[in-house]
Amino acid sequence: MLLFFEYRLKKRDPQRGMALILCIGFLALLSVLGAFVMDMTTRDIKLSGKAKVSGSIFRVADQAVEYALSPSVYGSLTGVGDTVDLTVSTHKDVFVTPGGPTDLFVGSVTYEGYGGTPANSDQFDTTASAGKVYRYFHVYAEAGSTNTAITERHFIDAQLAQAFPTVTNVPVTYASGKQGVSAAGGN
């Protein structure tokens, strides 16, 4: 019997271990490819999460600017230099969810006065200066994440003009019931 095993060992096929080597090599290649795909997927998930937070931060800054030009805010700005702080909770709670992932850190709207037609307004308003009064405002809003691990911030710093029609000789009924004629201006 010993002779039989000795005989089988000598008669081995030289190709016999090649399949195992190829399988191990193929498995190593698939492992590297799998690790690469997993790394790319992890990076994409992190980037999409960051883009979501970034979009949320920008929306807060943009909503602050929109809110600054609402009648409830600009109506209180009567004198040149008057400013409304948008970070006060009575204003901020309108567009920021208290305790949410984003917050408005700095926000203000300042009345800069009224005047004539803004430069290059004919590109955007075909009826520019045709019986209009322009009120100018400076709006600044800076929003960021409430998560201390995320240091990203977005800000909007803009000068905005609102056009109001100049109204003259139009009958007006006041809340008191008094009737009269409005004066020219509209600001």
Image (cartoon, rainbow, N blue to C red):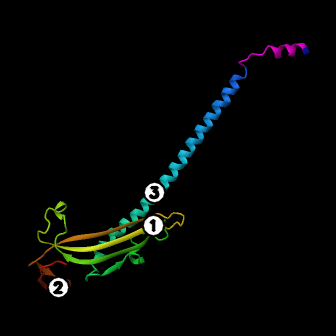
Coordinates of residue 48 in the picture (x, y in percent): 48, 52
Q: Is residue 122 above or below residue 78?
A: above
Work out whether residue 95 can be spotted: no
Mark 1 or 3, which is nearer the eye? Answer: 1
Q: What residue is rendered at 16% in x and 62% in y?
A: 122
Q: Quadrant of the N terminus?
A: top right
Work out whether residue 156 can be spotted: yes
The residue that disc 2 covers is 177
Question: What secondary structure is found at the residue carrying circle 1?
Answer: strand
Earlier in the chain: of badge 1 and badge 3, it is 3
Name the amino acid, label 3: Lys
User: Badge 2 local density, few (<14 within 10 Å), some, or many (20+)?
Assistant: few
In contact (CB < 8 Å): disc 1 and disc 2: no
User: Badge 3 local density, few (<14 within 10 Å), some, or many (20+)?
Assistant: few
Question: What secondary structure is found at the residue carrying circle 3?
Answer: helix
Q: Horizontal placement of 100 versus 83: left or right?
A: right
Q: Quadrant of the C terminus?
A: bottom left
The residue that disc 1 covers is 144
Residue 5 highlighted magenta (yes or no): yes
Mark 1 or 2, which is nearer the eye? Answer: 1
Name the amino acid, label 1: Gly
Question: What secondary structure is found at the residue carrying circle 2?
Answer: loop
Write down the region rendered in magenta. Answer: 3-15
